[in-house]
Amino acid sequence: MIAEVIVDVPANQTDKPFDYLVPDEWSDLLEAGMRVIVPFGPRKLLGFVIGLKDASEFGKLRSILSIVDDAPVLGEELIALGDWLARTTLCYKIQAFQAILPSMMKASYKKTLRVSSDQSLEEWPELQTLFGKKKLWAWEDIQKVAPKTLSKVKKALKEGILVADQHVGDQRTYKTIKHYLLAKKANEVLASLTGRARKQHELLEWMLRQPVGASFSFSDLEQAVSATRNTVKTLVEKGALVEEEVDVFRDPYQKEIQTTEPLPLTREQQLAILPILKDLETDTARVHLCHGVTGSGKTEIYLQTIQEVLKKGEQAIVLVPEISLTPQMVDRFKGRFGSDVAVLHSGLSQGEKFDEWRKIQRDEVRVVVGARSAIFAPFSNLGVIIIDEEHETSYKQEETPRYHAKDVAVFRSRYHKCPVILGSATPSLESYARAQKGVYHLITLKERVNNRMLPPVRIVDMREELREGNRSIFSKPLLEALQDRLQKGEQSVLLLNRRGYSTFILCRDCGYVVKCPHCDISLTFHQKEQRVKCHYCDYSLPVPRVCPECQSEHIRFFGSGTQKVEEALTQLLPEARVIRMDVDTTRRKGSHEKLLGQFGSRQADILLGTQMIAKGLDFPYVTLVGVLAADTTLHIPDFRSAEKTFQLLTQVGGRAGRHELPGEVIIQSYDPEHYSIVRAQHHDYDQFYVQEMMFRKQHDYPPFFYLTLITVSHESYVKAQETTKKMAVYLKKHLTEEAVILGPVAPAVARIKDRYRSQCMIKYKREPGLMPALKGLLDHYQNAYLKDGLSITIDVNPYAIM
Ligand code: ADP
Ligand code: ZN
Ligand code: ZN
């Protein structure tokens, strides 16, 4: 038997299966999708078996050295998915497989040194001490423990006194606990116990009443017969109990969650779910775009769809953006489906992620709720894939492989013949346009559950405020509204739209802005350390006291961070209790949950935060939502900036008045006539869509055209520019007349970590020659990084244009 293996070397020459012989004794054990260790040149490598066959067109084949897994880690579907990812995102197959699996399953390579069996260390006194202590040494350990012997070690290696062995494995770890079971001698020991050993007696008798072969953890025994550690230990020593290590799952969610029952659906919800249920019945792979205003009960539709899927004996994947993976959201799924739910998010340790993955693979759960990478959950019988907040750009991975979870969802739904539900109050233009054309099936929910009103939105013109002499961060109307809520004992949410917001240091005399000397961006002020920092390379400086350009003392920090707003709040409303949520206050594990819990139990009046508070929160006493600077996102150099602004404002607006108390939204803006702000004010997605589509059409942007972005970087500005120029010429030759090739262009951030960047953007409609041409470019430049320091990334359907 021959195995086709993708080896763990991300390079062009190795981006194809290699044939290996399978030793006869393994021909029954080995299956496609298992990982193996194979010889590759002088090395040993981890690899994935992607197929088995009887014959190979190659002569002398080498044999597989060992099998790593006892069951396939990739099924037939995921092997095909890896192949498709590699083709559509232009990555290597090995990178695609690595993205599909938890990171603990990546290979780890270790080298150890030992004394050659036919040699002795007689003439090597330094090494005698070293190898007297331990027979095997890892290279790094020698470096740490005895750096002075390194040269001797190298010499000994060369002379064959020492040998190096390579070890290949992966990074998996298991959590184990001790279990106890009865030994053969148990009865004998029991009979010999004296009357004083009452506890031991009791424990053994209890164990003897349990099913044969059952094993128990210490806490089981503690609960059953109040056993102490000492009693257990003594019985192990006497040979009555046997101790064994058993492998357990790390469980990050240990709290009890109240179970919930399905709610009777409203008329709108009933109409919405009908076509989805029909697809479930007929095993149809169709994409539904569920456009429902905030609070229209989309989540209840997801829950009841999943319930049907489980009835069919199938499984469900639910994707939510990382920042809305709040405990509140998770509880809604756990409340309905209990221990059938696995949760995958970035707050889990590698080990916890691996354990959640194992639960899925062993069919111990049937629903996965998670961020982007949960789309790869290894279910074998998927019944539905749900992507909530489908417009979120975090569903696109911004590193290799640059995949979009939506595309993966469509691939998987075709394989499993199951529907996909994309849900949003503000669908991406791409999705909505597809729904308009009938590529997706459109479901609309116009009303909030129980006819609760969408909150009225008021826009405050900050230029006007300035003219009237108000220089504070808070406009008069917003401040008054905050005071009003304080008096009534109601709660407020304040959003500081920090994306694109600068907290830079500016000289008010000469306009000098403190920038990073390595990257082309302004440094950000960090109050706690009183330093300015670069967010790209971590370069930092103490805050300058005088302007380096003109020596003026009027150099100061400009713009508002959450801390600054918090300070201003305490001054203006000293009696208000404020909770601040931003990257600084939520860094510690569980702090997110704790802060929200405090706000939920009304230990604070105002929740102040960045984007992370815009989504998924649902608190009954919140009646005011304020947005401090609505238009900062408008100034990001990205063609999606209006869409992002509209989405954000609509989302935060949805946080107010979700329950009995009516809500209100106040948006502060320096650009109050902008259509993204005006349309958000009127909750008018349809009009926003029409206006934004006109803009996209005018400039040949998606969804009218597709984009692909090539970014080249090099220490030399000229080199980066010229390479891009050559690429543009090459592409013009290989693409049709219809394709627009822009470049070289200088991106918004022109330099990162001392490397100049240059970009080439391709706009196209149908371009069958594009993928081969791009692959050709990559092949051509593959060794360029090593050779002349060029780096090239290709992003098909980019979301980050910077
Ligand atoms: P969305 O996901 O569209 O923002 P949610 O699913 O969060 O909306 O629903 C908003 C609120 O309405 C939630 O508190 C939810 O429990 C409630 N709700 C949803 N469907 C129903 C229903 N059919 N009957 C009563 N309450 C419902
Ligand atoms: Zn100056
Ligand atoms: Zn920098």
Image: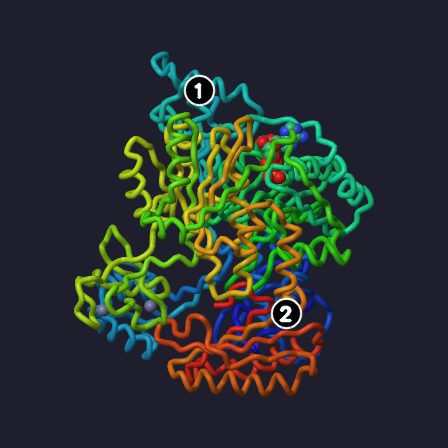
**Residue 462 rendering spot, x and y as whole percentages:** 41, 51
310 shown above or below 661: below
Q: Where is residue 731? Give x, y as percent.
A: 61, 83
Amino acid at circle 2: Gln
Question: Looking at the picture, how far across and down is residue 674, in whole percent?
Answer: 53, 56
Instruction: Give the spatial CA distance, label 1 vs label 2.
Output: 81 Å
Q: What amino acid is at disc 1?
A: Leu
Vertical side of 418 occupied by 396: above or below: below
Farthest residue to the front: give it.
468
Number of the front mark, 1 or 2: 2
Q: Residue at x 66, y 74 (%)?
A: 764
Element type at mark 2? helix
Residue at 50% across / 75% down in the picture?
711
Q: Residues within 10 Å of mark 2 (few under 14, many from 20)?
A: few
Determine crowd level at label 1: few under 14, some 14-19, many 20+ residues with C-alpha closer than 10 A. many
Residue 23 appears anywhere in the view: no
In the picture shown, does residue 705 fall above or below 603?
A: below
**Viewer-proximal residue among 378 and 658:** 658
Q: Quadrant of the N terminus?
A: bottom right
Q: Which residue does the image show at 33% across and 47% down from the upper left?
A: 470
Q: Is mark 1 within 8 Å of ligand 1?
A: no
Where is mark 2, residue-wise? Answer: 698
The residue identified by callout 1 is 203
Horizontal arrangement in the rendering, residue 403 relative to residue 204 (left or right): right
Counting the numbered discs, the total is 2
